Image (spheres, rainbow, N blue to C red):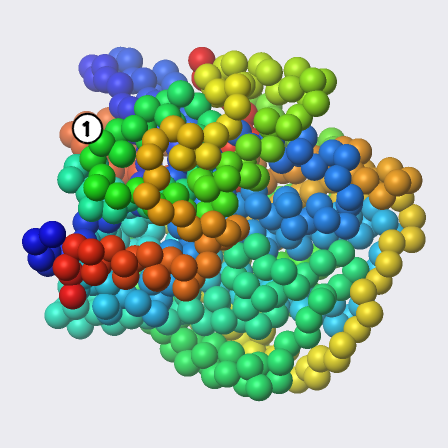
Amino acid sequence: MHNFDITIENLSKIEGHTDLDVKVRNNKVEHVQLKISENKRFYTQAIRGKPAIGAPQLMCRICGTCSIAHLICCIQAVENALGIKPTEQTILLRKLAMYGLYIRDHALHLYMFSLPDVIGKDSILDFDEKNEKEHKLLHQCFDVKAAGNALSTLIAGKPVHPPYPIVGGFTQTPDPEQTKEVIKKLEHVREDILELIDVFMPEKFNFTTETEYVCMTSPDFNFYTGDHICTGKYKCVPWEKYGEHLMHKVIPYSQASGYKFEGQTYLVGALSRINMNEAYLHEKTRKSAKKALEIFPSNNIYHNNLAQAIEILHSIDASVEILKKTKFKKEEIIAPKTAGTGVGVVEAPRGTLYYLTEVGQDGKITHADIVVPTGQNQINIEQDIKALIEANIDLPKDKLQFEIEKLVRAYDPCMSCAAHFLKINWQ
Amino acid sequence: MPKKEKLRIGWFTFACCEDNTIMMTEIMNDHWQEWSKKIEFAYARILKSKNELKNLDVSFIEGAIASDKDAERAKEIRKNSKYIVATGSCAVTGMPSAQRNLFDPETKKEIAPIIERFKHREKVLPVKDVIKVDDNLPGCPMNEKDFLQVLNKYLKLFGVN
């Protein structure tokens, strides 16, 4: 019979700070607690009383890596509250900003956080420049991240906390000469991503999880506009009902301890999106990643990595197409028309992100609520850690600890985002 | 100072969004070739799991000090580092992580249970209010050129070339 405790302080190679506490008695896991040690920063309180049109630029400071997702989602919520309908061009630019974010953010996770586990090294910085494969991957890491960075900079002004996207439109339009350069960079790294897909395809790690896959769905697999949120295979929420869905389903789920969403725990993120919406991927992506896509739908959480690699490819293909065929022109910023309540929903790299904003007649925020992807995945992560330990109870403690860390990394949690919202089930 | 082969760097974060950490990994895209010869990331949780808080030449600290635990940790970093660089707006000025310092009494009452439970300090502080800081990299996030300038200054100071 095994009795032991595992405490992992400050998990490495994830975004932000978290500790993990595990208690095993008589071969049974008595508790698993993901203790978010990230400090609370109280953004939803801080935003009250501030002008709604300035809210997105403050709220995006919640997260350094998925800043663009917070920015775009908050803009959408505020625009819905203020009766602003973005132009076709603005919608395209926001889609491009999200693609740039995906390329850079997924690349950070795949190359810098997950790849060392696959190669069997502690850090990408330990990769051997004299080993052809490791040398190549190291350089591809920097090239791919730089290409995503270049796309974000072209469209939004910066890769992190960018200045151009605002409520009502964009303050700048992409420069045609720079656009050509960015297209070149994106096309150049496309081959690298095909190799990355090959690296993650023969997935040597396997952890199967029974869960419901939830994501927003759009016919062109973009991450900004969605027709409906699918919660499970045949249940979909149309966009008019996003607010109701947020208030009655998502908020209670993310805040409750052990709450089940329509009787089932659920997962958001790349694995959900590829499982549910593979058919909507860019045609070129579907062709090039045909073999990898045959693996989906998958219940192996480690396929979240492969799904992210496929999403980088899609983001490249979709943005190159938009950049090549669109002539952007200067547009006026649309002014607010009303006051009220608005909901924003985007697919952030780690999953569905929700914003709720209430704006008073004076144009100031009276109330805000946010539900982040990692908050939605937390129940699943803890349940999976429990199952992983019980299935590998005879492993030496250090090996088991490594397996747990690897599993948590596969989920790609973001603790800067989660700090405010994760359920607190520890003393 | 005697010549060194590599500059031993630490990278730490407190209350913040880690945007400077992300910027550092982005600046690395163009500078890795050079850095790999001159820099040893002795402590960087974002990049590796085997970290060493010992005998660091320069430590970059991102984020504001929000709890006593943070303050203790900052002192430990100071003790084990020759130079400290406060990195990004939260580390340099406390803001925006220190927004709660300005909350009205009603909002302060609302967040009080969380402050108490997590043993947060009453006020969130910039790094310089807790330990001696040698250099500042302001900005939200920091500016790339400023970062490279500070880094090069320390490479020169430690005779790494």
Give x and y (percent) for residue A338: 92, 48
Q: Residue at left 63%, top 60%?
A: A163
Q: Is residue A328 left or right of residue B33?
A: right
Label 1: state its secondary structure: helix
Viewer-side residue, A30 vs A33: A33
Give x and y (percent) for residue A142: 35, 67
Q: In this view, does A396 lie to the left or right of A378?
A: left
Q: Quadrant of the C terminus of chain A?
A: top left
Q: In this view, does A99 lie to the left or right of A309?
A: right
Q: Residue at left 81%, top 40%?
A: A364
Q: Number of callouts in the render?
A: 1
Q: Is residue A347 above or below residue A406?
A: below
Hey, what amino acid is under mark 1? Answer: Lys
Q: Residue at left 48%, top 67%?
A: A148
Give x and y (percent) for residue A152: 55, 66
The reply to whether residue A349 is in sight is no
Q: Residue at left 19%, top 49%?
A: B8
Task: Look at mark 1 in the image and give the residue it sits on.
Answer: A397
Q: In which quarter of the image is residue B144?
A: bottom left
Q: Is residue B51 left or right of residue A211?
A: left
Tell which subunit mark 1 falls on. Answer: A
Give x and y (percent) for residue B157: 20, 56
